[in-house]
Image: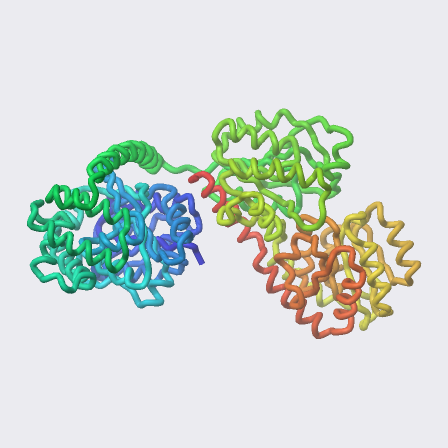
Amino acid sequence: MPLVSVILAVHNDARYLGSAVASVLRQSLDDLELIVVDDSSTDRTPELIASVRDPRFVALTNEEQLGLAASLNRGLDQASGRYVARLDSDDVALPGRLESQIRRIRAAPAVGVVGAGILDLDEAGRPGALHRNPVGPVAVRFLALFGAPFFHPTVLVDRELLDGNGLRYDPAYLESEDYDLWSRLLEVADGANLADALVLKRVHPGQASLRRSDVQESFQRQVALREIAGVAPDLGAPEAEAAWLLGSGRGSVDSEGAAPFRALLDAFERRYGVDPEVREAAARVLLRADARSGLALGPSYPARLAAGRATRQRAERKARKRAASWVEQLAAAPGPLRVTVVSPEPTPYRSPLFDLVSERPEVELAVIYAARTVAGRTWSVEPRHRSTFLRGLRLPGLARVLHHDYPVTPGIARALRESRPDVVVVSGWSTFASQAAIAWSRRRGIPYLPLVESHDLGPRSAWRRAVKGAVVPRVLRKAAGALALGTASRESLVARGAEREHVRVFANTIDVAAWEERAQELRARRAELRGRLGAADDDVVVLSVARLGPEKGLDTLVQAVVETRDARVLLVLVGDGPERPAVVRLARAGGVRLHLTGDLPADAVAETYVVADVFALLSTRETWGVVVNEAAASGLPLVLSNRVGAAYDLLRDGQNGVLVPAGDVTATTAALARLAADGRFREQAGQRSLELVREWGYELSVESFVAAVREAAAR
């Protein structure tokens, strides 16, 4: 479900449609769908629609011409976004439009519709005059007495408000179908406008608003008089007409309308109170018609309005410059987005994702690695994506502090220059290459995205907290968004200043579908594979796949198995490391049945998951833990410590396993004992693990990455 559904209706507008579509698909807010309703076009419009290749694009076709209102209603019925936005087929949305409007509508729960300012755009694509509507909710209501309080192609509406109140366009109102809809919507919610021009409104002879201005005026008058009667029922029909003519600018500017207009203002203020923005708008109208009536609202208004005109002129110049740049960008033929990733080392859980990203036609990917390995990895990874490996000097002593090497790689600057990136993705911030990449991107004004693994689970030394608290907010402040492994790392970023809506998930994961399929095939050999480990049919195999290091909580796991006092429990550990002798001693002392496999190839590891009944990972420090993905895809119940990053996305405590405090032998014992004793719970929990992990395959992470870099480039 997208955050925003943008609805665009078109009839024979092939000349401008391409720019309108591109301006939506290149918004800084990427979480959208664009619904284009072709109202039975006979020009090249259908051909242009068919040529759009974007998964966010939805095309609908009317078999016969229905008109704008009915076409928009069809789009509303199709929309699935939390919010609905409008754009006309000959207009252009500026790149930050949706992002700005979403921020505004979320800032005030009572506001259900948000519009914005517009700039005229001539046939040659040159920006012209700036037009604004009142900003505040009360002033919006006052303007709604005279005409549409929003420029139609700028609106963003809460879709639940429309659906919950049965609100749709009424085709009977022809060119004023939007004014009628906003009037009815303002009966159940507030409206607001942004002062900034966020849409370029095309001005050309073919516009319906110019061709049928008399029809539009007729229906505008009808709606306006209905609204005026609701606010000032004591105002007679001639007076209401005079007030509308003056307030809408439709009639002659003379003193005859001043008294009815002032009477309408008084009635409005009795209902909604005195609002400064309304008073200023009223003074502007009255000063043109009758100076004495205008000055009666306050003698300072002439000076204030003059100052406002000067401010408006400055804003118009800035808006034109920004708009001209955007129109030029849209006119340029879009090529693939050049994205350079700076990463410490290739890994078997990240490299396949980069391989898939590199296959996307809209992205030209290059990955710069600081080294073949910075953490003494023994795995072998052969990337299919374009890769560069830097050579550098390792500084002794830092590995103990950082938990990885710190190769000094001055070649990073040259590698970045040669890749000519539009966006830089920086994995982590604790290697020289990543730090240099952030500095390089900042100096050149190139948007960058931190890709963050770390989280705040568990205690940290005072110096680590101090460094992270000082450095990370500065990195995020200038970033164009961020990528996180999952919930734990995302919350850490948000706590340090990242905007939640601009933090996307790029997981450490596996090919879940392929892994699940292999596990199902291996289950036919489960009895044979268990026999190799000496596991009887009624034994409960508890598996952990991890480096045998002090941070993996293996002492807690072994001691918990001891405390279960269940002779059926067989503990299988896959991996090797410095803690192996200590684990063996602890298991012997407690009488634990222990099978150590050492390091195994991937196929053999997959077999051990099928052998197991329970998977446990009790790390005291674990940014994610891809073995959790593997275990879940193998259909196993999970026992995870609360410092394993994956626990907050792949474990539902009590549903597919148990979350235990790191280092807590008692809690771990209870979890293992429960799972060992209850075969039905193990089966149900394993099935729930499969359901959860299916949402963490490659596809969603690749889509998230592409959306994040596209959004960063637009921002």
The total number of labels drawn is 0
Quadrant hosting residue 398: top right
Q: Is residue 642 left or right of residue 16?
A: right
Residue 52 x, y percent position in the rendering: 36, 48
Q: Nearer the viewer, residue 135 or 319?
A: 135
Residue 343 x, y percent position in the rendering: 62, 37
Work out whether residue 68 can be spotted.
no
Q: Quadrant of the C terminus?
A: top left
Please tell me whether residue 226 is drawn above or below residue 621 in the rendered image: below
Work out whether residue 385 can be spotted.
yes
Residue 85 x, y percent position in the rendering: 34, 53
Residue 539 x, y percent position in the rendering: 82, 70
Q: Nearer the viewer, residue 298 or 259?
A: 298
Identified at 75% across, 51% down, the residue is 620
Q: Quadrant of the N terminus?
A: bottom left
Query: Outermost residue toward the right?
Result: 589
Colouring rule applied to residues = rainbow
Identified at 85% across, 70% down, the residue is 566
Identified at 78% across, 31% down, the residue is 397
Quadrant hosting residue 650: bottom right
Q: Nearer the viewer, residue 471 or 71?
A: 471
